[in-house]
Image (cartoon, rainbow, N blue to C red):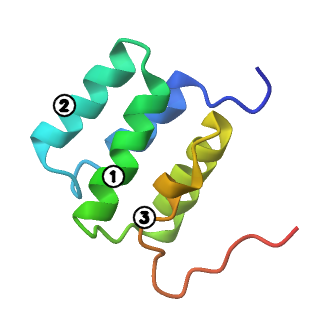
Amino acid sequence: MAGYPAPGEMASLLDSLKDELHPRAREIVRGLLDVGEHRLAIEHLCELVGEDEITLDATAYRRLMAVASGLGLDERYTRIVPVPPGFAPDVK
C-alpha cells in the first residue's frame, strides 16, 4: 500500500518519545504495534499525547503526523495533538 508507514518507522517514533510518555503508555502502544494493530496503536498514541498535553518537538510532531496520514487516521485523532510552539508546516 503506497504511503503506508513501515512498522519500523512507527516503532522508531515511539522510541523517540520515551522521555515524554509514561512507561505503561509506551508498553500499551508497543504491544499494539507488536500484534499488527498499527492504526489502533497510533490512534492511541495521539490520544495519549493530546490528553496529557505533551508538547512534542517539531521533528516528533512532523513524524507523528506523517505516520497518522500514512495510516489514514481520522482528523479527530490528529487534531488533539498539540502543535509545537512556533511550528511551521512544510510548504510544497
Q: Which residue is mark 2?
A: 27
Residue type, numbered disc 1? Glu
Please state if 28 lies on the left or on the right of 64 as rendered.
left
Residue 18 % position (x, y): 24, 48
The residue that label 3 is drawn on is 80
* Marks 1 and 3 in Cβ contact (< 8 Å): yes
Quadrant, the C terminus: bottom right
Closest to the observer, 21 or 12: 21
Answer left or right for 42 relative to 31.
right
Please say if 13 is above or below 32: below
Q: Amino acid at mark 2?
A: Glu
| Label 3 element class | loop
Tell me the quarter of the picture where residue 14 sits: top left
Task: Give percent across and percent down for residue 60.
Answer: 47, 58
Q: CA distance from mark 2 to mark 3?
A: 21 Å
The residue positioned 75% from the left and 33% from the top of the image is: 3
